[in-house]
Image (spheres, rainbow, N blue to C red):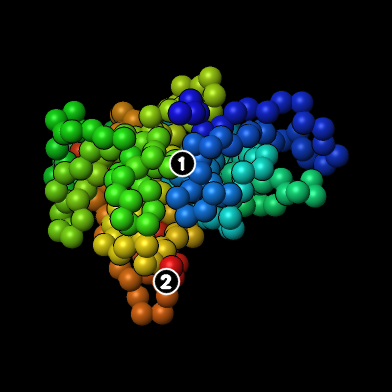
Amino acid sequence: MESCYYERVDDIPNSDDDADDFEYFSPTAATLSVWASDIQHGGPPAGLLMRSLLRCAPDPTQEFTRVTTEILGPIGLGLNRVRARVVRPGQQIALIEADLEVRQPDGRYRLAAQSVGWRMRTTDSTTITRAPREPLPSPETLPVVRGVTGDGDLGVDWGTVGFIGTTDTAATPGLHGQTPAVWIKPSIDLVEGETMSNLESVFTVLDVANGLGTTLRPDEWTWMNTDTTVHLVGQPTTPWLGIDADMAAGRHGYGATFADLYDVDGFLGRSAQTVLLGPR
């Protein structure tokens, strides 16, 4: 199995005036989507974008509270490059944006994904802390498996292929009833030779909410999300993310997945994803 999702690439010859603003990475087979063998799953790119957001003009007095990741097209396996900038600086709030571009066969780069994150200043609000959901059972008390399922009858291998096969998961009854809640974390590094932060870990796996929240069969339907928006009420204290998701399928080929998110200490926030539905 691969040991990381991305390998750093240095000494890239560039003709662009702003090329020095980018970091360059080569995606490994661990980033592969289950839907196609020539594109990445949405999770690792979201983790790489979060890494870039965290490194852009860091401020220890602020924390990310809302992050939206837009998938603008297929995220290919060619050379990836990422950069971030401060859109709106401030002591109370700041807006940070990160871009991920993929090199095309003709050598040009195409913008494939973007993340935009609000950072807010922190203060002590312990006395008014309130969570809308009870904590999930700790993943340490549950059986942990690799991937989600290896059921070949579903037409898609969720257990061993590509990105899904690099995750550790543990299931527990969810509040939504139709689907279980799932603890999930990456089992390998985001970037070769780097220790992944807890926030990078969470953003690397949270894209799977649209898959966890559906009862559709992947041999009959596809449900690719075009975006993921996350609102946080705190920062994760471990690499584990608990996801209790539910997908609403509309009548015109699209829907939405909504999920409650959990840290091992309790409720962490919520996510929402637009889902493009299609028959296989």
Q: Position of residue 206 (x, y in %)?
A: 38, 45
Q: Residue at x 78, y 40 (%)?
A: 18
Q: Position of residue 270 (x, y in %)?
A: 31, 51
Q: Position of residue 176 (x, y in %)?
A: 18, 58
Q: Which residue is mark 1?
A: 162
Tell me which amino acid carries mark 1: Gly
Q: Would you place residue 65 above or below residue 61 in this image?
A: below
Quadrant of the frame with the N terminus? top left
Quadrant of the frame with the C terminus? bottom left
Looking at the image, which is closer to me, 183 or 56? 183
Q: Residue at x 53, y 19 (%)?
A: 193
Q: Can the viewer see residue 82 in this picture?
A: yes
Q: Can the viewer see residue 83 in this picture?
A: no
Tell me which amino acid carries mark 2: Pro
Secondary structure of residue under mark 2: strand
Q: Which residue is mark 2?
A: 279
Q: Residue at x 15, y 58 (%)?
A: 177
